[in-house]
Image (cartoon, rainbow, N blue to C red):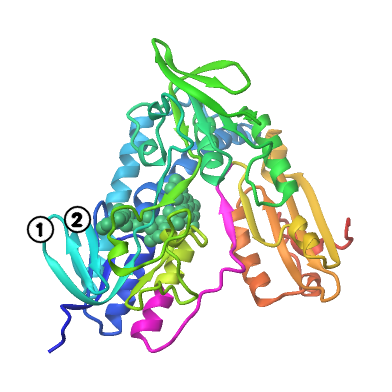
Amino acid sequence: MSAFDVDLFVIGGGSGGVRAARIAATYGARVMIAEEFRYGGTCVIRGCVPKKLMVLAGRFADDFRDAAGYGWSVGETRFDWRALIAAKDREIARLEGVYRGNLERAGVTVRDGRAVIEGPHEVRLLATGERIRAAHILVAVGARPSLEPTIPGGELGITSNEVFDLAEQPRRVLVIGGGYIAVEFAGIFAGLGSETALLHRGDKLLRGFDEELRDKLGAAYARRGVELLLGRTAEAMERTGDGIAVRLSSGETRVFDQVLVATGRRPNTAGLGLETANVALDEGGAIVVDAYSRTLCPSIYAVGDVTNRANLTPVAIREGHAFADTVFGGKPTMVSHEIIPTAVFSTPEIGTVGCSEELARARGGEVAIYKTSFRSMRATLSGRDDPVFMKLVVDKPSDRLLGAHLMGPESGELIQLLGTLVTMGATKADLDRTIAVHPTAAEELVTMRTPVA
Ligand code: FAD
């Protein structure tokens, strides 16, 4: 008889943990999983999915405006925040059930409640005190929003954990942060009609993205009425009769109904008992792993946001799957984090993959840049401001496509396929010999002929 109760104990029922548990179980492993909040994790419960639903809600305002340009009389429109939140909650509950059901159907033993590590092979469920001996432990506990840097009154702000459940739509909202979550929520609130300001200590949004994309998004947000408070920080917050007064480093004080702090996320490693198994953390509290997601303790692996490699759902899923293949499927699999296509669900939307122009140049290679900007076809009849921008970064000597950076409708959808092209090493000549699909915006991707730099 095995000395272990299970072959695998997974801590955390989010993107990475659920995938790893299911795949390990299909390989015949005895798997138990514990989730302290809700199955589906950040992505399903309070991340990608509810966020995208809210982005879609916000975009109807543009649709109504466009419709008039096409001869439709839309009549009076009104947005009901509570109806959206209730509909979103129903969909999230449905998805949560799907995740749990998939685990159970795969034969995984599902537990609710917090689990902690008590040694290289030991896990304890806090709710019941049950101790489980596991041949392997997978830590997939994700990350949580941080309110840092702490400022006086900072606790008056909310994070992305709370924003999905607000009882009322804020009339005036301040979003603090310059990363994709801050940018997306500023776009959501503006789309839904809140007076929206975005405060960021840097001078541009979306650090790490192609500089031109950053400039164009900032300009588009300003035109859409998002007040950009850049190069500034919040120094203090105070509740007043009129709302939350936020004192800015520029000296002014502004009042809002809600302040959403989206300045960063921290790995969920505190109090997890990792020290009982000598699992090493980096200075930011993330678990240190090798390319197979193995920690310094040979029986313990970690995947997803808790390792702070590339904090995206598909990456956590890929890491979880590769872990199961490696440990239970007899197929050692490393995950490459080199080329990761990704979207920012701002409005206008962004899709990006591979090297930015700046990164390509910094690497010293000879680079050719192709780009175009125009107004989306849909907005031509309505006269709405709906910019499209496309940029391709090509390695001159090899003609290989190094990066693609898009802004405009459906950029998230487009970048999925451009991601395949960059991953497979497609060349500019491959794009050139592709016949265009007309009339689309995407045809520009295969018809740009003259490099601009
Ligand atoms: P999680 O999904 O966070 O799952 C970890 C789970 O572990 C949680 O459910 C938690 O409750 C549980 N847990 C923690 N500690 C314990 C414990 N001790 N015992 C038991 N359970 C525990 N990514 C994208 O790719 N696209 C997007 O559009 C996108 N949008 C996002 C929007 C927002 C607002 C946020 C916050 C994130 C978004 N992300 C997006 C990122 C994505 O959600 C994460 O990268 C992904 O969820 C990471 O998966 P994970 O398995 O590592 O962790």
Q: Residue at x 39, y 26 (%)?
A: 156
Question: Is residue 213 placed above or below 189 in the rendered structure?
Answer: below
Residue at the disc numbered 2: 113
In terms of image quadrants, where is residue 163?
Answer: top left
Residue at the disc numbered 1: 128
Q: Magenta stretch?
A: 321-346
Which quadrant would the N terminus be assigned to in this image?
A: bottom left
Could you classify mark 2 by the number of other residues whose Cα lies within 10 Å: few (under 14), some (14-19), or many (20 or more)? some
Q: Horizontal placement of 340 versus 372: left or right?
A: left
Mark 1 residue's CB less than 8 Å from ligand 1: no
Q: Horizontal placement of 260 versus 214: left or right?
A: left
Question: Is residue 192 placed above or below 326 in the rendered structure?
Answer: above
Q: Estimate the spatial distance between the alpha carbons at disc 1 and disc 2, rounded to whole Å.
A: 9 Å
Picture coordinates of residue 419, whole percent (x, y):
62, 67
For ligand 1, the image quadrant comes to: bottom left
Q: Residue at x 36, y 82 (%)?
A: 327
